[in-house]
Image (spheres, rainbow, N blue to C red):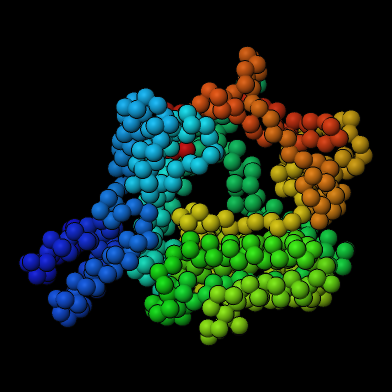
Amino acid sequence: MRTIDLSLVDSDDRIFVQSLLTPFPVEAQRILFSEYLRHPSKFERNTYLRQTTHSIAHKLSIPLKNIDLNIDEDGLRVKAKEMASAVLSLRRFYLDDLEAKSGVHALLLQQGIEPYSKEHSLEGEMSRYCDPKWWLRRLRKALRRNIETVLHHLNQVNKKRGIYASDITLRARIQQKYAQKQYLENTIAINELGQSFSLLELSQKGVSDPTIRKGELMLRARGFEELAQEMGHEAAFLTLTCPSKYHRSFAKSGHPNPKWDGATPLDAQEYLNNIWQLIRATLSRLGIRFYGFRVAEPQHDGTPHWHLLLFVEPAHYQVMVDTMRKYNLLEDGQENGALEHRFTEVKIDPSRGSATGYIAKYISKNIDGSDLDSGVYGEDPKDAAARVDAWAACWGIRQFQQLGGCSVTVWRELRRLKEVQNLPKLAKDIIAAADIGNWKDFTQMMGGVFSTRKEQVFKPLYAFSFDRDTGAIKTSLYCARELVRTLKGITAYGQDIISRVHQWCIDLVDVKGLNLEFCE
Protein backbone atom coordinates (compact mmCIF):
# COMPACT_ATOMS: atom_id res chain seq x y z
CA MET A 1 0.00 0.00 0.00
CA ARG A 2 2.65 2.48 -1.12
CA THR A 3 0.14 5.27 -1.75
CA ILE A 4 -1.59 5.05 1.64
CA ASP A 5 0.02 6.76 4.63
CA LEU A 6 -1.26 4.74 7.57
CA SER A 7 0.41 7.11 10.01
CA LEU A 8 -2.62 9.35 9.43
CA VAL A 9 -4.82 6.64 10.97
CA ASP A 10 -5.27 6.14 14.70
CA SER A 11 -2.84 3.47 15.80
CA ASP A 12 -5.55 1.13 17.05
CA ASP A 13 -7.40 1.36 13.71
CA ARG A 14 -4.50 0.75 11.33
CA ILE A 15 -4.91 -3.03 11.04
CA PHE A 16 -8.65 -2.58 10.52
CA VAL A 17 -8.17 0.05 7.79
CA GLN A 18 -5.39 -1.85 6.08
CA SER A 19 -7.38 -5.09 6.00
CA LEU A 20 -10.34 -3.39 4.32
CA LEU A 21 -8.29 -1.44 1.76
CA THR A 22 -5.73 -4.08 0.72
CA PRO A 23 -7.99 -6.17 -1.59
CA PHE A 24 -8.84 -3.18 -3.80
CA PRO A 25 -6.88 -1.66 -6.71
CA VAL A 26 -4.39 1.03 -5.65
CA GLU A 27 -6.49 3.72 -7.35
CA ALA A 28 -9.55 2.61 -5.39
CA GLN A 29 -7.53 2.51 -2.15
CA ARG A 30 -6.55 6.15 -2.63
CA ILE A 31 -10.17 7.18 -3.20
CA LEU A 32 -11.47 5.24 -0.21
CA PHE A 33 -8.69 6.48 2.06
CA SER A 34 -9.14 10.09 1.01
CA GLU A 35 -12.86 9.90 1.76
CA TYR A 36 -12.11 8.09 5.02
CA LEU A 37 -9.97 11.00 6.21
CA ARG A 38 -12.66 13.54 5.40
CA HIS A 39 -14.97 12.26 8.11
CA PRO A 40 -14.47 14.24 11.31
CA SER A 41 -14.79 11.55 13.98
CA LYS A 42 -13.24 8.15 14.45
CA PHE A 43 -16.66 6.50 14.56
CA GLU A 44 -17.79 8.17 11.32
CA ARG A 45 -14.55 7.29 9.52
CA ASN A 46 -14.66 3.62 10.44
CA THR A 47 -18.39 3.36 9.79
CA TYR A 48 -17.94 4.88 6.32
CA LEU A 49 -15.13 2.49 5.40
CA ARG A 50 -16.90 -0.58 6.77
CA GLN A 51 -20.23 0.19 5.09
CA THR A 52 -18.70 1.21 1.77
CA THR A 53 -16.44 -1.81 1.42
CA HIS A 54 -19.30 -4.07 2.49
CA SER A 55 -21.63 -2.65 -0.18
CA ILE A 56 -18.90 -3.04 -2.81
CA ALA A 57 -18.16 -6.60 -1.70
CA HIS A 58 -21.83 -7.46 -2.13
CA LYS A 59 -21.46 -6.84 -5.88
CA LEU A 60 -18.17 -8.69 -6.38
CA SER A 61 -18.04 -12.26 -7.65
CA ILE A 62 -15.43 -13.28 -5.07
CA PRO A 63 -15.61 -12.90 -1.27
CA LEU A 64 -13.59 -9.89 -0.12
CA LYS A 65 -11.34 -12.05 2.05
CA ASN A 66 -10.30 -14.12 -0.99
CA ILE A 67 -9.93 -11.38 -3.57
CA ASP A 68 -6.80 -9.62 -4.87
CA LEU A 69 -7.58 -6.93 -7.43
CA ASN A 70 -3.94 -5.82 -7.71
CA ILE A 71 -2.75 -9.02 -9.34
CA ASP A 72 -0.97 -8.47 -12.67
CA GLU A 73 -1.00 -10.59 -15.84
CA ASP A 74 1.98 -12.67 -14.77
CA GLY A 75 0.27 -13.29 -11.45
CA LEU A 76 -2.87 -14.40 -13.27
CA ARG A 77 -0.86 -16.90 -15.29
CA VAL A 78 0.66 -18.36 -12.14
CA LYS A 79 -2.75 -18.53 -10.50
CA ALA A 80 -4.28 -20.18 -13.58
CA LYS A 81 -1.69 -22.95 -13.39
CA GLU A 82 -2.28 -23.36 -9.66
CA MET A 83 -6.05 -23.65 -10.08
CA ALA A 84 -5.74 -26.15 -12.94
CA SER A 85 -3.36 -28.19 -10.78
CA ALA A 86 -5.80 -28.04 -7.84
CA VAL A 87 -8.61 -29.42 -10.00
CA LEU A 88 -6.35 -32.19 -11.27
CA SER A 89 -5.49 -33.09 -7.68
CA LEU A 90 -9.17 -33.32 -6.78
CA ARG A 91 -9.83 -35.61 -9.72
CA ARG A 92 -6.94 -37.85 -8.74
CA PHE A 93 -8.10 -37.93 -5.13
CA TYR A 94 -11.65 -39.07 -5.96
CA LEU A 95 -10.79 -41.13 -9.06
CA ASP A 96 -14.40 -40.48 -10.10
CA ASP A 97 -15.34 -37.24 -11.86
CA LEU A 98 -18.93 -37.44 -10.67
CA GLU A 99 -17.79 -37.50 -7.05
CA ALA A 100 -15.19 -34.78 -7.65
CA LYS A 101 -17.63 -32.50 -9.46
CA SER A 102 -19.18 -30.76 -6.45
CA GLY A 103 -15.77 -29.99 -4.95
CA VAL A 104 -14.48 -28.66 -8.26
CA HIS A 105 -17.58 -26.49 -8.70
CA ALA A 106 -17.05 -25.05 -5.21
CA LEU A 107 -13.47 -24.22 -6.19
CA LEU A 108 -14.69 -22.38 -9.28
CA LEU A 109 -17.30 -20.40 -7.38
CA GLN A 110 -14.66 -19.31 -4.86
CA GLN A 111 -12.87 -17.67 -7.79
CA GLY A 112 -16.00 -15.97 -9.11
CA ILE A 113 -16.38 -18.38 -12.03
CA GLU A 114 -19.66 -20.03 -12.93
CA PRO A 115 -19.35 -23.77 -13.67
CA TYR A 116 -20.76 -25.22 -16.87
CA SER A 117 -24.30 -26.53 -16.71
CA LYS A 118 -24.97 -29.06 -19.49
CA GLU A 119 -22.89 -27.80 -22.39
CA HIS A 120 -20.33 -30.61 -22.26
CA SER A 121 -19.89 -34.21 -21.24
CA LEU A 122 -18.69 -34.80 -17.68
CA GLU A 123 -15.22 -35.77 -18.90
CA GLY A 124 -15.06 -32.77 -21.23
CA GLU A 125 -16.20 -30.39 -18.50
CA MET A 126 -13.70 -31.63 -15.94
CA SER A 127 -10.88 -31.69 -18.48
CA ARG A 128 -11.52 -28.02 -19.26
CA TYR A 129 -11.11 -27.21 -15.59
CA CYS A 130 -7.64 -28.79 -15.74
CA ASP A 131 -6.48 -26.46 -18.51
CA PRO A 132 -4.47 -23.36 -17.41
CA LYS A 133 -5.57 -21.52 -20.58
CA TRP A 134 -9.22 -22.10 -19.68
CA TRP A 135 -8.58 -20.76 -16.19
CA LEU A 136 -6.62 -17.73 -17.38
CA ARG A 137 -9.41 -16.55 -19.66
CA ARG A 138 -11.99 -16.76 -16.89
CA LEU A 139 -9.77 -15.36 -14.14
CA ARG A 140 -8.96 -12.42 -16.37
CA LYS A 141 -12.63 -11.81 -17.11
CA ALA A 142 -13.56 -11.99 -13.42
CA LEU A 143 -10.71 -9.64 -12.49
CA ARG A 144 -11.61 -6.99 -15.08
CA ARG A 145 -15.28 -7.07 -14.16
CA ASN A 146 -14.62 -6.91 -10.41
CA ILE A 147 -12.21 -3.97 -10.82
CA GLU A 148 -14.74 -2.10 -12.92
CA THR A 149 -17.45 -2.85 -10.36
CA VAL A 150 -15.33 -1.25 -7.63
CA LEU A 151 -14.53 1.86 -9.68
CA HIS A 152 -18.13 2.19 -10.87
CA HIS A 153 -19.26 2.03 -7.24
CA LEU A 154 -16.78 4.77 -6.33
CA ASN A 155 -18.18 6.98 -9.11
CA GLN A 156 -15.05 6.90 -11.23
CA VAL A 157 -17.01 6.16 -14.41
CA ASN A 158 -18.66 9.34 -15.66
CA LYS A 159 -18.10 12.18 -18.11
CA LYS A 160 -15.91 14.06 -15.63
CA ARG A 161 -13.51 11.23 -14.72
CA GLY A 162 -13.66 8.30 -17.11
CA ILE A 163 -16.50 8.33 -19.59
CA TYR A 164 -18.17 4.96 -20.35
CA ALA A 165 -15.40 2.92 -18.68
CA SER A 166 -12.73 3.56 -16.07
CA ASP A 167 -9.18 4.43 -17.08
CA ILE A 168 -7.96 1.12 -15.59
CA THR A 169 -10.36 -0.90 -17.73
CA LEU A 170 -9.47 1.13 -20.81
CA ARG A 171 -5.75 0.51 -20.28
CA ALA A 172 -6.34 -3.20 -19.69
CA ARG A 173 -8.38 -3.46 -22.90
CA ILE A 174 -5.70 -1.67 -24.92
CA GLN A 175 -3.04 -4.00 -23.54
CA GLN A 176 -5.23 -7.03 -24.23
CA LYS A 177 -5.83 -5.98 -27.84
CA TYR A 178 -2.10 -5.37 -28.29
CA ALA A 179 -1.34 -8.88 -27.00
CA GLN A 180 -4.02 -10.31 -29.27
CA LYS A 181 -2.54 -8.49 -32.26
CA GLN A 182 0.92 -9.87 -31.43
CA TYR A 183 -0.53 -13.36 -31.23
CA LEU A 184 -2.40 -12.99 -34.54
CA GLU A 185 0.64 -11.52 -36.30
CA ASN A 186 2.85 -14.36 -35.14
CA THR A 187 0.44 -17.23 -35.67
CA ILE A 188 0.46 -18.67 -39.18
CA ALA A 189 -2.41 -20.64 -40.70
CA ILE A 190 -1.40 -23.10 -43.44
CA ASN A 191 -3.91 -24.91 -45.64
CA GLU A 192 -3.68 -28.17 -47.56
CA LEU A 193 -2.38 -26.31 -50.64
CA GLY A 194 0.57 -24.93 -48.73
CA GLN A 195 -0.84 -21.40 -48.69
CA SER A 196 -0.01 -19.54 -45.50
CA PHE A 197 -1.38 -16.39 -43.91
CA SER A 198 -1.04 -14.84 -40.51
CA LEU A 199 -4.22 -14.91 -38.45
CA LEU A 200 -4.09 -11.12 -38.50
CA GLU A 201 -4.30 -11.11 -42.30
CA LEU A 202 -7.25 -13.48 -42.20
CA SER A 203 -9.05 -11.48 -39.50
CA GLN A 204 -8.75 -8.32 -41.58
CA LYS A 205 -10.75 -9.97 -44.35
CA GLY A 206 -13.86 -10.55 -42.21
CA VAL A 207 -16.30 -8.78 -39.93
CA SER A 208 -13.80 -8.76 -37.08
CA ASP A 209 -12.26 -5.83 -38.94
CA PRO A 210 -14.05 -2.64 -37.72
CA THR A 211 -14.35 -1.07 -41.17
CA ILE A 212 -15.87 -4.19 -42.69
CA ARG A 213 -18.20 -4.70 -39.72
CA LYS A 214 -19.46 -1.13 -39.89
CA GLY A 215 -19.93 -1.33 -43.66
CA GLU A 216 -21.94 -4.53 -43.39
CA LEU A 217 -24.21 -3.14 -40.66
CA MET A 218 -24.90 -0.01 -42.69
CA LEU A 219 -25.54 -2.08 -45.83
CA ARG A 220 -28.09 -4.27 -44.04
CA ALA A 221 -29.79 -1.28 -42.42
CA ARG A 222 -30.09 0.41 -45.81
CA GLY A 223 -31.46 -2.81 -47.31
CA PHE A 224 -34.14 -3.02 -44.62
CA GLU A 225 -35.07 0.61 -45.23
CA GLU A 226 -35.40 0.09 -48.99
CA LEU A 227 -37.49 -3.00 -48.38
CA ALA A 228 -39.75 -1.13 -45.94
CA GLN A 229 -40.31 1.68 -48.42
CA GLU A 230 -41.20 -0.80 -51.14
CA MET A 231 -43.65 -2.65 -48.86
CA GLY A 232 -45.16 0.50 -47.36
CA HIS A 233 -43.95 -0.25 -43.83
CA GLU A 234 -43.37 2.50 -41.30
CA ALA A 235 -40.12 3.17 -39.47
CA ALA A 236 -39.44 4.24 -35.90
CA PHE A 237 -36.32 5.13 -33.96
CA LEU A 238 -36.90 4.15 -30.33
CA THR A 239 -34.77 4.50 -27.20
CA LEU A 240 -35.15 2.38 -24.05
CA THR A 241 -33.57 3.76 -20.88
CA CYS A 242 -33.30 2.35 -17.35
CA PRO A 243 -34.98 3.80 -14.24
CA SER A 244 -33.00 6.31 -12.15
CA LYS A 245 -31.88 3.72 -9.60
CA TYR A 246 -29.67 2.06 -12.25
CA HIS A 247 -27.72 5.29 -12.95
CA ARG A 248 -24.62 5.91 -10.87
CA SER A 249 -24.23 9.65 -11.46
CA PHE A 250 -25.76 12.72 -13.07
CA ALA A 251 -24.87 13.45 -16.69
CA LYS A 252 -24.20 17.18 -16.33
CA SER A 253 -22.18 17.30 -13.13
CA GLY A 254 -20.93 13.75 -12.64
CA HIS A 255 -22.10 13.96 -9.02
CA PRO A 256 -23.45 10.80 -7.37
CA ASN A 257 -27.11 10.06 -8.02
CA PRO A 258 -28.87 9.68 -4.63
CA LYS A 259 -31.43 7.30 -6.17
CA TRP A 260 -28.77 4.83 -7.28
CA ASP A 261 -29.25 1.50 -5.47
CA GLY A 262 -25.86 -0.08 -6.15
CA ALA A 263 -26.74 -1.51 -9.57
CA THR A 264 -23.92 -2.28 -12.00
CA PRO A 265 -24.13 -1.87 -15.79
CA LEU A 266 -24.70 -5.63 -15.95
CA ASP A 267 -27.74 -5.26 -13.68
CA ALA A 268 -29.05 -2.55 -15.98
CA GLN A 269 -28.51 -4.72 -19.06
CA GLU A 270 -30.40 -7.55 -17.37
CA TYR A 271 -33.27 -5.15 -16.67
CA LEU A 272 -33.43 -4.13 -20.34
CA ASN A 273 -33.28 -7.77 -21.45
CA ASN A 274 -36.16 -8.67 -19.15
CA ILE A 275 -38.27 -5.77 -20.43
CA TRP A 276 -37.49 -6.78 -23.99
CA GLN A 277 -38.60 -10.36 -23.38
CA LEU A 278 -41.96 -9.10 -22.10
CA ILE A 279 -42.35 -6.80 -25.10
CA ARG A 280 -41.55 -9.50 -27.64
CA ALA A 281 -43.84 -12.04 -25.98
CA THR A 282 -46.75 -9.59 -25.97
CA LEU A 283 -46.24 -8.50 -29.57
CA SER A 284 -45.94 -12.12 -30.65
CA ARG A 285 -49.28 -12.96 -29.02
CA LEU A 286 -50.82 -9.99 -30.83
CA GLY A 287 -49.39 -11.18 -34.16
CA ILE A 288 -47.30 -8.02 -34.59
CA ARG A 289 -44.08 -8.58 -36.52
CA PHE A 290 -41.22 -6.15 -36.94
CA TYR A 291 -37.64 -6.08 -38.17
CA GLY A 292 -34.61 -3.85 -37.83
CA PHE A 293 -31.66 -3.39 -35.49
CA ARG A 294 -30.85 -2.91 -31.84
CA VAL A 295 -27.79 -1.00 -30.62
CA ALA A 296 -26.80 -1.30 -26.95
CA GLU A 297 -24.51 1.50 -25.84
CA PRO A 298 -23.39 3.06 -22.56
CA GLN A 299 -24.48 6.35 -21.15
CA HIS A 300 -21.70 8.46 -19.66
CA ASP A 301 -21.61 6.44 -16.40
CA GLY A 302 -21.60 3.04 -18.11
CA THR A 303 -25.34 2.40 -17.67
CA PRO A 304 -26.57 0.82 -20.92
CA HIS A 305 -29.51 2.01 -22.95
CA TRP A 306 -30.87 0.66 -26.21
CA HIS A 307 -31.57 2.30 -29.54
CA LEU A 308 -33.96 0.45 -31.86
CA LEU A 309 -34.49 1.08 -35.54
CA LEU A 310 -37.66 -0.87 -36.30
CA PHE A 311 -39.88 -1.32 -39.35
CA VAL A 312 -43.46 -2.50 -39.00
CA GLU A 313 -46.72 -2.68 -40.92
CA PRO A 314 -48.67 0.63 -40.61
CA ALA A 315 -51.68 -1.00 -38.92
CA HIS A 316 -49.44 -2.30 -36.14
CA TYR A 317 -47.24 0.74 -35.61
CA GLN A 318 -49.09 2.39 -32.74
CA VAL A 319 -49.78 -0.86 -30.87
CA MET A 320 -46.07 -1.72 -31.07
CA VAL A 321 -45.04 1.69 -29.71
CA ASP A 322 -47.70 1.70 -26.97
CA THR A 323 -46.67 -1.80 -25.85
CA MET A 324 -43.03 -0.79 -25.58
CA ARG A 325 -43.90 2.36 -23.66
CA LYS A 326 -46.12 0.38 -21.28
CA TYR A 327 -43.44 -2.11 -20.32
CA ASN A 328 -40.73 0.55 -20.03
CA LEU A 329 -42.84 2.36 -17.44
CA LEU A 330 -43.76 -0.68 -15.37
CA GLU A 331 -40.87 -0.18 -12.94
CA ASP A 332 -40.74 3.23 -11.21
CA GLY A 333 -42.91 4.70 -13.94
CA GLN A 334 -44.13 7.52 -11.67
CA GLU A 335 -40.71 8.98 -10.88
CA ASN A 336 -39.84 12.43 -12.20
CA GLY A 337 -38.79 12.44 -15.83
CA ALA A 338 -39.94 8.87 -16.52
CA LEU A 339 -42.62 9.85 -19.05
CA GLU A 340 -40.22 12.12 -20.94
CA HIS A 341 -37.00 10.09 -20.88
CA ARG A 342 -37.63 6.41 -20.11
CA PHE A 343 -38.97 5.67 -23.58
CA THR A 344 -38.65 7.97 -26.58
CA GLU A 345 -40.12 7.55 -30.05
CA VAL A 346 -39.29 9.23 -33.33
CA LYS A 347 -41.57 8.25 -36.19
CA ILE A 348 -39.44 8.57 -39.29
CA ASP A 349 -40.77 10.55 -42.23
CA PRO A 350 -38.91 9.39 -45.39
CA SER A 351 -39.48 12.79 -46.99
CA ARG A 352 -37.51 14.47 -44.20
CA GLY A 353 -34.67 12.02 -43.64
CA SER A 354 -33.33 8.52 -43.99
CA ALA A 355 -34.13 5.86 -41.40
CA THR A 356 -30.60 4.52 -41.76
CA GLY A 357 -29.28 7.99 -41.02
CA TYR A 358 -30.80 7.81 -37.53
CA ILE A 359 -28.77 4.75 -36.60
CA ALA A 360 -25.60 5.53 -38.58
CA LYS A 361 -23.96 7.69 -35.92
CA TYR A 362 -24.63 5.08 -33.24
CA ILE A 363 -23.05 2.36 -35.35
CA SER A 364 -20.01 4.56 -35.99
CA LYS A 365 -19.73 5.68 -32.37
CA ASN A 366 -19.74 2.10 -31.12
CA ILE A 367 -17.22 0.74 -33.62
CA ASP A 368 -14.46 3.20 -34.55
CA GLY A 369 -15.77 6.76 -34.20
CA SER A 370 -14.97 7.65 -37.79
CA ASP A 371 -17.18 10.11 -39.70
CA LEU A 372 -18.10 11.84 -36.42
CA ASP A 373 -16.97 15.29 -35.29
CA SER A 374 -17.63 14.65 -31.60
CA GLY A 375 -19.34 12.23 -29.25
CA VAL A 376 -22.66 12.63 -27.47
CA TYR A 377 -21.03 14.46 -24.56
CA GLY A 378 -18.56 16.42 -26.69
CA GLU A 379 -15.77 13.86 -26.29
CA ASP A 380 -13.34 12.82 -29.00
CA PRO A 381 -15.22 10.19 -31.06
CA LYS A 382 -12.25 7.85 -31.53
CA ASP A 383 -11.42 7.94 -27.83
CA ALA A 384 -15.10 7.36 -27.13
CA ALA A 385 -15.14 4.30 -29.43
CA ALA A 386 -12.14 2.82 -27.59
CA ARG A 387 -13.87 3.34 -24.27
CA VAL A 388 -17.14 1.86 -25.53
CA ASP A 389 -15.19 -1.17 -26.76
CA ALA A 390 -13.60 -1.54 -23.31
CA TRP A 391 -17.04 -1.21 -21.70
CA ALA A 392 -18.62 -3.88 -23.92
CA ALA A 393 -15.70 -6.29 -23.47
CA CYS A 394 -15.67 -5.86 -19.70
CA TRP A 395 -19.39 -6.42 -19.14
CA GLY A 396 -19.91 -8.90 -21.98
CA ILE A 397 -22.63 -6.80 -23.60
CA ARG A 398 -23.57 -7.48 -27.21
CA GLN A 399 -23.57 -4.12 -28.97
CA PHE A 400 -25.42 -4.89 -32.21
CA GLN A 401 -28.25 -7.27 -32.93
CA GLN A 402 -30.37 -7.73 -36.03
CA LEU A 403 -34.05 -8.20 -35.22
CA GLY A 404 -35.99 -10.29 -37.71
CA GLY A 405 -35.01 -10.66 -41.34
CA CYS A 406 -32.95 -13.41 -42.93
CA SER A 407 -29.92 -15.31 -41.71
CA VAL A 408 -26.74 -13.23 -41.67
CA THR A 409 -24.73 -16.46 -41.48
CA VAL A 410 -26.20 -17.59 -44.80
CA TRP A 411 -25.52 -14.16 -46.30
CA ARG A 412 -21.85 -14.31 -45.33
CA GLU A 413 -21.39 -17.89 -46.51
CA LEU A 414 -22.96 -17.13 -49.88
CA ARG A 415 -20.51 -14.27 -50.33
CA ARG A 416 -17.65 -16.77 -49.88
CA LEU A 417 -18.75 -18.97 -52.77
CA LYS A 418 -16.52 -18.99 -55.84
CA GLU A 419 -18.56 -21.21 -58.15
CA VAL A 420 -22.16 -22.43 -58.20
CA GLN A 421 -23.60 -25.20 -60.38
CA ASN A 422 -26.77 -27.32 -60.62
CA LEU A 423 -28.97 -24.92 -58.67
CA PRO A 424 -32.38 -23.46 -59.62
CA LYS A 425 -32.49 -19.91 -60.94
CA LEU A 426 -33.91 -18.56 -57.67
CA ALA A 427 -30.97 -19.93 -55.70
CA LYS A 428 -28.49 -18.47 -58.19
CA ASP A 429 -30.24 -15.10 -58.02
CA ILE A 430 -30.01 -15.15 -54.22
CA ILE A 431 -26.30 -15.90 -54.42
CA ALA A 432 -25.85 -13.09 -56.94
CA ALA A 433 -27.70 -10.63 -54.69
CA ALA A 434 -25.48 -11.55 -51.75
CA ASP A 435 -22.37 -11.31 -53.91
CA ILE A 436 -23.10 -7.70 -54.94
CA GLY A 437 -24.26 -6.71 -51.44
CA ASN A 438 -27.96 -6.28 -52.19
CA TRP A 439 -29.59 -7.03 -48.85
CA LYS A 440 -33.07 -6.00 -50.02
CA ASP A 441 -33.23 -8.44 -52.94
CA PHE A 442 -31.46 -11.13 -50.92
CA THR A 443 -34.12 -10.87 -48.20
CA GLN A 444 -37.04 -10.87 -50.61
CA MET A 445 -35.84 -13.90 -52.55
CA MET A 446 -34.87 -15.83 -49.41
CA GLY A 447 -38.52 -15.81 -48.34
CA GLY A 448 -39.26 -12.28 -47.20
CA VAL A 449 -38.50 -10.22 -44.14
CA PHE A 450 -41.02 -12.09 -41.97
CA SER A 451 -40.03 -15.60 -43.05
CA THR A 452 -38.92 -18.09 -40.41
CA ARG A 453 -35.54 -19.80 -40.62
CA LYS A 454 -37.23 -23.02 -41.78
CA GLU A 455 -39.02 -21.18 -44.61
CA GLN A 456 -35.90 -19.53 -46.01
CA VAL A 457 -34.38 -20.97 -49.20
CA PHE A 458 -30.84 -21.39 -47.87
CA LYS A 459 -29.94 -22.60 -44.39
CA PRO A 460 -26.55 -22.86 -42.66
CA LEU A 461 -24.81 -26.21 -42.96
CA TYR A 462 -23.12 -27.54 -39.84
CA ALA A 463 -21.28 -30.84 -40.04
CA PHE A 464 -18.69 -32.91 -38.25
CA SER A 465 -15.09 -32.00 -39.00
CA PHE A 466 -12.84 -34.80 -40.18
CA ASP A 467 -9.24 -35.32 -41.18
CA ARG A 468 -9.00 -35.61 -44.96
CA ASP A 469 -5.94 -37.86 -44.78
CA THR A 470 -7.31 -40.42 -42.32
CA GLY A 471 -11.06 -39.84 -42.54
CA ALA A 472 -11.27 -39.71 -38.75
CA ILE A 473 -13.86 -37.37 -37.26
CA LYS A 474 -12.21 -34.65 -35.24
CA THR A 475 -12.96 -34.53 -31.55
CA SER A 476 -12.72 -31.91 -28.85
CA LEU A 477 -9.34 -31.17 -27.33
CA TYR A 478 -10.83 -32.08 -23.97
CA CYS A 479 -12.78 -35.26 -24.66
CA ALA A 480 -12.51 -37.94 -27.35
CA ARG A 481 -16.28 -38.48 -27.20
CA GLU A 482 -17.09 -34.83 -27.99
CA LEU A 483 -17.36 -34.71 -31.77
CA VAL A 484 -16.70 -31.31 -33.33
CA ARG A 485 -19.41 -29.78 -35.51
CA THR A 486 -18.49 -26.62 -37.40
CA LEU A 487 -20.02 -24.35 -40.01
CA LYS A 488 -19.19 -25.80 -43.44
CA GLY A 489 -21.43 -23.86 -45.82
CA ILE A 490 -25.10 -23.77 -46.72
CA THR A 491 -27.80 -26.16 -47.79
CA ALA A 492 -30.78 -25.78 -50.16
CA TYR A 493 -33.02 -28.04 -52.26
CA GLY A 494 -31.48 -31.10 -50.61
CA GLN A 495 -28.02 -30.08 -51.75
CA ASP A 496 -25.13 -29.29 -49.41
CA ILE A 497 -22.81 -26.57 -50.67
CA ILE A 498 -19.39 -26.29 -49.03
CA SER A 499 -18.13 -22.72 -48.77
CA ARG A 500 -15.29 -23.46 -46.35
CA VAL A 501 -13.17 -25.68 -48.54
CA HIS A 502 -9.78 -25.48 -46.86
CA GLN A 503 -8.35 -27.31 -43.88
CA TRP A 504 -5.98 -25.21 -41.81
CA CYS A 505 -3.25 -26.02 -39.34
CA ILE A 506 -1.78 -23.46 -36.98
CA ASP A 507 1.89 -22.67 -36.45
CA LEU A 508 2.95 -20.25 -33.70
CA VAL A 509 6.10 -18.41 -34.72
CA ASP A 510 8.79 -18.30 -32.03
CA VAL A 511 9.46 -14.60 -31.65
CA LYS A 512 12.17 -13.72 -29.16
CA GLY A 513 11.04 -11.33 -26.48
CA LEU A 514 7.33 -11.95 -26.98
CA ASN A 515 5.37 -13.75 -24.30
CA LEU A 516 2.53 -15.22 -26.36
CA GLU A 517 1.56 -17.92 -23.86
CA PHE A 518 -2.20 -17.99 -23.27
CA CYS A 519 -2.76 -15.03 -25.64
CA GLU A 520 -5.34 -16.62 -27.89
Which residue is painted at 52% across and 32% down in the image? 121
Name of the residue lying farthest toward the bottom: 336
Q: Is residue 133 shown above or below 109? A: above
Visible residue check, residue 376: no
Left or right, 229 with reference to 339: right
Residue at 90% x, 42% y: name it: 426
Q: Residue at x 54, y 72 (%)?
A: 242
For residue 348, what is the image quadrant?
bottom right
Q: Position of residue 114 (x, y in %)?
A: 44, 46
Position in image of residue 302 (x %, y %) = 47, 66
For the image shown, how many numbered marks are present on the structure?
0
For the residue pair 60 and 418, the one nearer the viewer reads as 60
Q: Quadrant of residue 410?
A: top right
Farthest top residue? 470
Residue 446 point in image, percent of width and height: 84, 47
Which is nearer the eye, 349 or 69?
69
- For image coordinates 60% across by 29% down, the residue present is 484
Q: Is residue 115 left or right of residue 15?
A: right
Q: Residue furthest front?
A: 99
Which quarter of the rendered picture does the N terminus lie within?
bottom left
As drawn, 44 above or below 275? below
Residue with the most extreme right position: 425
Q: Position of residue 12 (x, y in %)?
A: 8, 66
Asked whether residue 318 is in view, the answer is yes
